[in-house]
Amino acid sequence: MQTIKLLIDGQFVESQTSEWREVINPATQTVLARVPVATAREVEAAVGAAKRAFAGWRYTPIGTRARIFLRYQQLIREHTQEIAALLTAEQGKTLADAEGDVFRGLEVVEHAANIGTLQMGELANNVAGGIDTYTLQQPLGVCAGITPFNFPAMIPLWMFPMAIACGNTFVLKPSEQDPMCTMRLVELALQAGIPAGVLNVVHGTAPVVDALCDHPDVKAISFVGSTRVGTHVYERANRAGKRVQCMMGAKNHAVVLPDANKEQTLNALAGSSFGAAGQRCMAVSVVVLVGAANQWVPELVERAKSLKVGDGAAQGTEVGPLISKAARERVERLIASGQVEGAHIELDGREPALESTLQSGNFVGPTIFSKVKPGMSIYDEEIFGPVLCLCQAETLDEAIAFINRNPNGNGTSIFTQSGAAARKFQEEIEVGQVGINVPIPVPVPLFSFTGSRASKLGDLGPYGKQAVLFYTQTKTVTARWFDDQTVAPLNTTISLSK
Ligand code: NAD
C-alpha cells in the first residue's frame, strides 16, 4: 500500500511513527494509502528546516520568487486532470468539482506570481523638513498552515504560495483524511523551483497541530476547518504569541424574493446546497423564502430529487459521497433529529438508490426540510451534508433580521430582480461575503476571502491583499540624511546648486 511521505528540508521521507491512518475512497471504501501521524521529532525537524531556509529565502529577490510561481501555475495547469482524479478518489466530489477545486487554488498561485506589485510598501515624501517616511512589508519567518478535508487542493493553495511568495518559509499540515492530491501539488511546487526547506509538510492530527501552535519558531498560523478546532487553534497559538487567522464553520442563508428569476434561482439553490454533497463551507444550507416564493417548494424538491447520487468518478454523477462513515452517521443522526424536533421532511435522502458496487459508500442523497426554526439541531448546527433547511419570512426586513440573528458570517445570498432590494440587503446584512443572484459568493484572489463573525477568528483573510498583510510585518522607516560634502542640511536655506 502507498505510504504518504513527510517533506522535510527538500526530501520526501518515510515517517518513523508507529501511528498511521488510512486514506479511504469514500465511494467504494477501498483503502488508497496510509498516512502517518508525525512524531514530535519530525515536527521539530520540519520547523527547524524551515527556520534555516528562511535565513536565505527572505533575501531572495522578488523577481526570483515570482518566477517560481509562474512556473508553478503552468505545472498545475498541465497536471489538473491527474490531480482532480486523485482528489475525487480520496475525497469523493465529482471530477468536475475536483477540477474546480484545483482551478480555484491555481488562481491564487497566479496571483502569487504578481507578488512584485502586491508586496510594495508606501512612501510619504518630506513628512517634516528633509524627512521621508516609508514602509517595508517584511516576511515573518516560519509560517504554518492547517487545512480541512473538503478542498484539499484549493485550501493548501490559499496558504503556502502567498506565504512563500512574501518571503516566508512554510510547514503545511494537510487533512489526514485526503492528503494525496495535496502531496502531488507539493511535489509540483518543488519541481517549479521552491528550494529545500522553504516548504515542508508534516501529517497528523491534534498533537501535530498543537505542536505547531506551541512552537516558538512558528510565527504565524493559518487554519481552515471547523469552528470547534479553529477556536482551539486560535486560542492556543495566540497564547504562544503568534499571528493567527482561522476560517471556520458556517450556516449560509439564501433569501429568495418572489420577484426572483425562478428557473435560475432553483437551479442555483439545488447546485449550491447539494453539490459536493453539501461539504462546502460556502454551501447554501438555509433558504429563507419570502412571501409567495414559498410556493416554489415542490419544484425545488423535484430538482433535488433529479440529482444523480453516485461515485464522483462516474460520468453523470452530481452528488458524491460524504467523506467518512462517521460523517455519514452524523448527518443521518441530524436528519432524524429534524423529524423529532418538528421540522417537516420534504425529501429524505437517507439510503439513496445506488449501484451495487457502491453499497458500502458514505452516501446520503439530497434532503430538504421545511418549517425549520432556530433551536432545532438541523438549524443550529452546521450539518456539512446535502441537507437544506427551508424557513419562511413575510418581508425582506424580517429575512434580514432572521439572518443577522444567526451567529455565523461566512456567506449569504439574495435572489431578486430588484436592484433596490439587493442593495438594501447588501447594506444591512451582517455577513462578510454577499452574493446577489450568486449562490456561492467566494471572491477571486484579486480580493480576499472575507467570512466574518463566528465563521472567522483573526482580522485578515486568506489570499489577495489581506494575505500579504497577514504574512508580512509592516515596518515603518522614518529617514533623514545628512551629507556635509555635497548637500547642506535641507532644513536650512542653502541652495542645492552650490
Ligand atoms: P476539522 O476542524 O475537523 O479539521 C481541520 C484540521 O484540523 C485538519 O487538518 C485536522 O487534522 C485538524 N484537527 C482535527 N481535530 C483537531 C484537534 N482536536 N486539535 C487540533 N487539530 C485538529 O475540519 P474538517 O472536518 O476537515 O473540515 C470541515 C470544516 O471546515 C467545516 O466546518 C467547514 O465549514 C470548515 N471550512 C471552512 C472554510 C472557511 O473558509 N470558512 C473552508 C473550508 C472548510
Image (tube, rainbow, N blue to C red):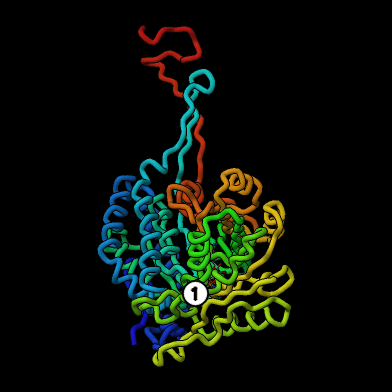
Count of numbered labels shown in the rendering: 1
Above or below, comparing residue 464 to residue 125 in the picture: below
Quarter of the view holding residue 319: bottom left
Q: Position of residue 282 (x, y in %)?
A: 53, 62
If the picture is divided into quarters, which one holds ligand 1? bottom right
Q: Residues within 10 Å of mark 1 (few under 14, many from 20)?
A: many
Q: Residue at x 63, y 45 (%)?
A: 424
The quadrant the N terminus occupies is bottom left
Q: Position of residue 131 (x, y in %)?
A: 50, 23
Instruction: Find out if the beta carbon at label 1 lies less than 8 Å from the nearest ligand 1 atom.
Output: no
Query: In this view of the protein, can residue 362 be seen by the observer?
Result: yes
Q: Nearer the viewer, residue 96 or 60?
A: 96
Instruction: Tell me if 90 is positioned left or right of 401 in this view.
Output: left
Quarter of the view holding residue 107: bottom left
Above or below, comparing residue 266 to residue 477 in the picture: below
Q: Nearer the viewer, residue 210 or 306?
A: 306
Q: Nearer the viewer, residue 141 or 99?
A: 99
Above or below, comparing residue 341 to residue 297 in the picture: below
Q: Amino acid at mark 1?
A: Ala
Q: Residue at x 70, y 60 (%)?
A: 393
Q: Residue at x 59, y 60 (%)?
A: 254
Find numbered disc 1 in the image and state the secondary structure of the residue it sits on: helix
Q: Position of residue 2 (x, y in %)?
A: 33, 84
Q: Residue at x 41, y 49 (%)?
A: 166
Instruction: Tell me if 441 is positioned left or right of 67 in this view.
Output: right
Query: In this view of the protein, can residue 461 be seen by the observer?
Result: no
Quarter of the view holding residue 343: bottom right
Q: Would you name the residue on which mark 1 appears?
A: 277
The quadrant the C terminus occupies is top left
Q: Position of residue 420 (x, y in %)?
A: 60, 43
